[in-house]
Amino acid sequence: MLSCEQATELMSQEQDRPLSLAERAGLRLHVWICTGCSNYRRQMAVLRAACRRFGSGGTP
Amino acid sequence: MELDRQSELNALRPDLLRFARLQLRDAGAAEDAVQETLLAALTGSHRFESRSSYKTWLISILRNKIIDIIRSQSREVSATSLADDEAGDELLHESLFDRRGHWKETARPGRWADPEASFEQQQFWRVFEACLDHLPEKTARVFMMREFLGFETGEICKETGISASNCWVVLHRARMGLRTCLEDSWFAGAKA
């Protein structure tokens, strides 16, 4: 079972490289039962969206 | 109706300069990049109907100038400077996780209310910039190459001389630092 710390590492890496099948399965299970990490994953998506917006000059 | 480009340029210049400074962390180089962008913008013949589309266009020119500067510098990110960045990172991890690597009760990530609404507020972007600026220099450089300039990790390795696995560690560190800063400085206050 992954720790939250390990899960956050994978949630970062999934944005930079394709995860292996085993990594994906472990992460899916962890996020399913862990509210903190499930929120963290949403935050990563927000962060990326914010960066896209900032990096393309789309800020108000 | 066509914009008065000269006055728009003056109005947008501070935004461009902040964007360049954040990424280059070198006032002189940032100034150069912005000057070149303004020059390119003044000689271009595109027409723009709004300030926002003009800004998007200017930022895309500036991004290319920043990429050129980064490539020409080919600054090696030395192992020692990354180690400096690491010290702060350990403190952050200790504040977030217990010994078994689980979230501490006080640090468990919460739900961020309506991020899209935040994106519409200038104040949010001031906080976002401050959080970026707060990241250790090398960490921030790698992160911005990835997220703003669109480098693949392979290219980042080449430009900075660090290994792929090191690059993933640095990116993870940056994201963790940034989301923690945003949670503390922005979203925690916006929570219902």
Image (cartoon, coloured by chain):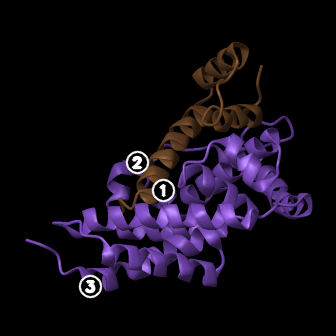
Is residue B95 at all visible to an observer of this figure?
yes
Q: Which residue is mark 3?
A: B6
Is residue B96 at all visible to an observer of this figure?
no
Q: Secondary structure at mark 3?
A: helix
CA distance separating discs 2 and 3: 39 Å
List x then y, in percent, for residue B33.
53, 75
Q: Which residue is mark 1?
A: B187
Residue at 57% over, 75% down: B21
CA distance separating discs 2 and 1: 7 Å
Around disc 2, counting alpha carbons within 10 Å, would you say few (fewer than 14), some (14 to 19), or many (20 or more)? few
Label 2 vs 1, first from the N-terminus: 2
Asked where in the image residue B66 lies, by quadrant, the reply is bottom right
List x then y, in percent, for residue B122.
36, 69
Residue at 67% over, 55% down: B177
List x then y, in percent, for residue B42.
32, 78
- Chain A: its colour in the image is brown
The residue nearer to you, when weighing B147 against B106, is: B147
Q: Are marks 2 and 1 on the same chain?
A: yes
Q: Chain of mark 2?
A: B
Q: Which residue is mark 2?
A: B113
Residue contact at pointers 2 and 1, CB within 8 angstroms? yes
Report the number of numbered marks.
Answer: 3
Q: Is residue B1 left or right of residue B131?
A: left
- In which quadrant will I find the N terminus of chain B? bottom left
Q: Which chain is painted in purple?
A: B
